[in-house]
Image (cartoon, helix red, strand yellow):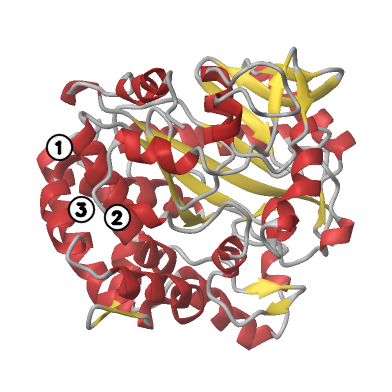
Amino acid sequence: MDIKNKSQFIEYFLKGIKKPNQLKIGVEHERFLFEGQNKKRISYITLKKLFENLKQNGWEPLFEKENIIGMKRDNQQITTEPGLQCELSGAPLDNIHQVCAESSKFLKEIEAASIGLDINTVSIGFDPFNNLSDIPKSPKQRYKIMTSEMPKGGSQSLEMMYRTCGIQINYDYTSEINFEKIFRLGNYLTPLTIALYSNSPFESGKPVGYFSYRNKVWQNTSRGGIMPIAFEKVSFEKYFDHVIEYPVLFAIRNKKYIDPNGQTFKDFILGRFNNLKDEANLNDFETHLATIFTEVRLKQYIEVRSLDACDWECLCDGPAFFTGLFYNSLDEAFEIASKWKKENVMSAYIESPQKGLETELEGKKLYEWGKIFLDLAKKGLKERNEVNSKGNNETVYLNHVENVVQNKKNRAQLLLEQYNKTKNLDFFKNEKENFNYSGF
């Protein structure tokens, strides 16, 4: 049956279109917080103390019912993930210098607010210290529903929710055609993204056989993966038609969460969602879009979601790499990747968490593709010519990926080399990050 009010939902995406001089970059990065030398995950009681300490930096608490679930300051938010992972949802910013400075300031504030609480952190994409059953749970209502529902569609969904941390980078689009190129390029590059930013090689204190176990887990997560439409011509309407076939995960009415029943969002739009009498509105659509956990997804901006949480330099490097490609080298990069066959991309996608940079795609190893796209990213950043107070453009942040490509080793491989010397993870126990990055 035709959806009579389809245009209002497509209009939602059209309203996301920006002028070329309005393009922003937004970064969301998750962190594991641990307590004590044994790296037990932070308790909700300790997290509330941390949030209390952050108030002196201008952060204000966010509540759900009587529970504090995050903090807000201007256009930034600190949110809590299902296992109390801490996420900074950064402000939309103009350049990587600002992105990097924002991350630096946030991590310093967390460090200062942790004094006296015995909180420490590790830069990694999968919790290597704690079993699923030992991880405290966030009091958020949506996570209770997800904990019940998500395993029905993916065997490792709870591992994803409670034991992973990632980096997400958000980009604007200037037209429907521009959206299509960014969306499709982001999907085609997912195997390369995984290989370059792999940083989760351990589980339960020892190597797990993957460079990015986080991405392996995400591949077995409900509502995840690469959207099949990424390999075809894509429009806002086509994206809409695809995502409304996903089941409703939850709906919200008067701050109350409505449980799912297996029906799709299309049923909801047509007024056939049995758990509610009314039809879906734009707020419901926005909620639904946020419950699709694919590697790249669309809201009123495009989200790239395949990077493991990693060390300090990655927080600047990943956004720099994709900004150069998406905002200034898009046509050249898309021209290369769009020729790749779907079956080859999907094969590399499945293999890359385990084989990393040695994964083959269209006759080349991923480290070879890494050099090609790194050069395009550099070219794009030079063209942007966003210069900081030291006179550096944004290419200064590409040191990490440059080293990965040149040495054919990602961070996971470097961690495994340390493990092979000590046969334990004690090298994490005294990890201290230098939050003053040389680029700004």
Task: Identify the residue position indicated by label 3 in the image.
Answer: 377
Question: Is residue 100 visible to us here?
Answer: no
- Labelled disc at residue 398: 2
Q: Residue 172: x percent and y percent? A: 31, 31
- Amino acid type assigned to the residue bearing label 3 in the image: Ala
Q: Earlier in the sequence, mark 3 or mark 2?
A: 3
Residue at position x 48%, y 41% in the image = 243
Task: Identify the residue position indicated by label 1 in the image.
Answer: 384
Q: Residue 115: x percent and y percent? A: 76, 37
- Give left or right: position of 308 versus 96: right
Q: CA distance from mark 2 to mark 1?
A: 15 Å
Q: Residue 363: x percent and y percent? A: 22, 83
As rendered, which of 362 and 121 lies closer to the eye?
362
Is 432 above or below relative to 93? Answer: below
- Give left or right: position of 358 versus 417: left
- Amino acid type assigned to the residue bearing label 1 in the image: Arg
